[in-house]
Image (cartoon, grey):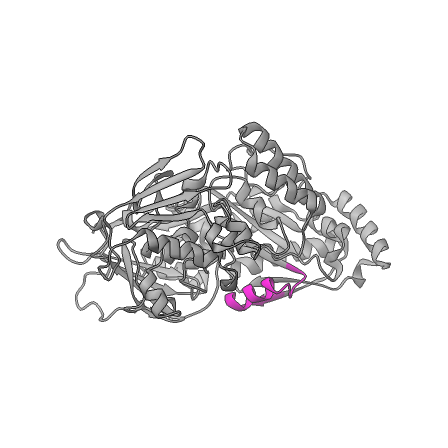
Amino acid sequence: MLMLLALTLVLAACNFGSEKESTDDTKEGASEEGGSKELNLVIPSEPPSLHPQLATDSTSNAILQNVFEGLTTVKDGEVVEAAAEKIDVSDDQLTYTFTLKDAKWSNGDPVTAEDFEYAWKFALDPKNASEYASILYPIKGAQAYNLGEGSVEDLGIKVVDEKTLEVTLENPTPYFLELTAFKTYYPIHKATAEANDTWYAEAGDSYVTNGPFKLTDWQHSGSITLEKNENYWDVDNVALDKVNISMVESETTASTMFDAGEIDWLGSPFQTIGLDVIDRYKEEGILKISDYAAIYVYKFNTTEGPTANANIRKALTLAIDRQGLIDNVTKGEQTPALGMVPSAVKGFEEDRGYMKDNDIEEAKKALDAGLKELGLSDPSELKLSLSFNTSEAHAAIAQFIQEGWRTNLGIDVTLDNSEWQVYLDKVSNLDYNIARMGWIADYNDAYTFLEMYNSAENGNNDTGWENAEYTQLLEQSNTETDPAKRLELLKQAESIIMAETPVAPIYYYTNLSVKKDYVKNMEQDSLGNMYLKYVDVEK
């Protein structure tokens, strides 16, 4: 789901944006009977964008999925109707007819089919440069329009009436109802967006939403405040009155705040647990570890520099001691990633045999071949830098891998860290040699981990790599209706990207979290979603 999984990001003030401080002995957020129920959290940075069709990262998504709501949502791991009251699917699995609930926007206006149509067309319009536009490609005509090869009139998006949206697909897409729960498929209040093209930049009357919470305060680089949306269709089942979210870059600071009772819950997709306290939280019996369909990777710039050479990329990829990293640094019971698709994804549970972990012998062979191809005689002649966004965890991981490359391959790699938004810009502009990134499944299917590399022009690719056979296999998988044959096509595609290594898979994530005893029903799902609608505070 989330693209760019950030363990920690940007330092900011630790206030929660509250209008007043507590004047009695009751901790704010832990309400007495009949009082306001408030939850205190931290996120690692300023969200890069709170526009559903422009956001690409997990920090922004953690906010968006609680203030907006799609046609469907996920509850207890299952897709259920949300803004949609009823969903009818044609026998050929190509036409979906969504009948909307009598739901309202936070300003009281009705949520209409036209609001969904407007948002989806905004994402697909090439001039808006939505990096997640491709997630709408299952819709008929979507890819052609987004690539400037088709017209908006040919899109399979039809407003039948105010409460009915008809969607026609290019091919049967078994996970389409999972997609409609994703942020790029959220609606936008059309009238507001047409009147103000920067509606999403600030809290206030222009930030109109249809989810269980509304954005009432946004102190940039400081804090965000969410309050229960009294116009939400299911408001009676929303327990929390207010969510106070402070922006805290340091995992150590966040852990200290949790220990002191200043925040009530700590973990992804908000702020992650510092590496230095994982063992202590395990000993205290409060650390929860759960499965996570997500991968931590190092991307390579394949367009220039030493990493444009496939053998150099292969050498660097093979010479990573993943299990040693997990045992000595991350300590979260992650799994070494020896493929591009996590083992939590159905059909990819087993090792596909692409490589061995920490295979120094094969790494040295690839290095020798790469040096020869580059006309170099010694690994010390390679000038490489490893980039990551500011984070204690990312730095510790980078230092461990940097030392392995130096010891085992004789390659000295410099480390380069940047603040989150600056970092995203660098990676998007291919202004790097090697760069860390994370990818959370947008839906539970292998395609979400492979699709971003189908073209160098894909907004989430960020490597410059593409391969015609790889792209063809992915396209075939979209039209293959036999599940077993489709799975085989995806595995063939994975074998190609693993052979050419534009990306070095490092480990498959687990979700780590700690919470106060009075926080109820606050659980991430396997895609990293955290729906605060279901959370309660009982103290």
Relative image position of residue 151 (x, y in whole percent): 51, 55
Using the image as rendered, state which of residue 59 and residue 396 is in the foreground: 59
In the rendered structure, does residue 208 fall within the stretch colored magenta? no
How many tags in the picture?
0
Q: Quadrant of residue 224?
A: bottom left
102 relative to 21, above or below: above
Using the image as rendered, state which of residue 532 and residue 380 is in the foreground: 532
Magenta-tinted stretch: 416-434
Relative image position of residue 286 (x, y in whole percent): 37, 46
Relative image position of residue 263 (x, y in whole percent): 32, 59
- Residue visible at 79% across and 48% down in the picture: 366
Q: Quadrant of residue 450?
A: top right
Relative image position of residue 160 (x, y in whole percent): 33, 47
Q: Quadrant of residue 463?
A: bottom right
Q: Say whether residue 265 is visible.
A: no
156 relative to 190, above or below: above
Horizontal side of residue 481 vs 322, given as left or right: left
Horizontal side of residue 340 vs 40, given as left or right: right
Q: Say whether residue 248 is visible.
A: yes
Using the image as rendered, state which of residue 250 and residue 308 is in the foreground: 308
Q: Residue furthest front?
A: 153
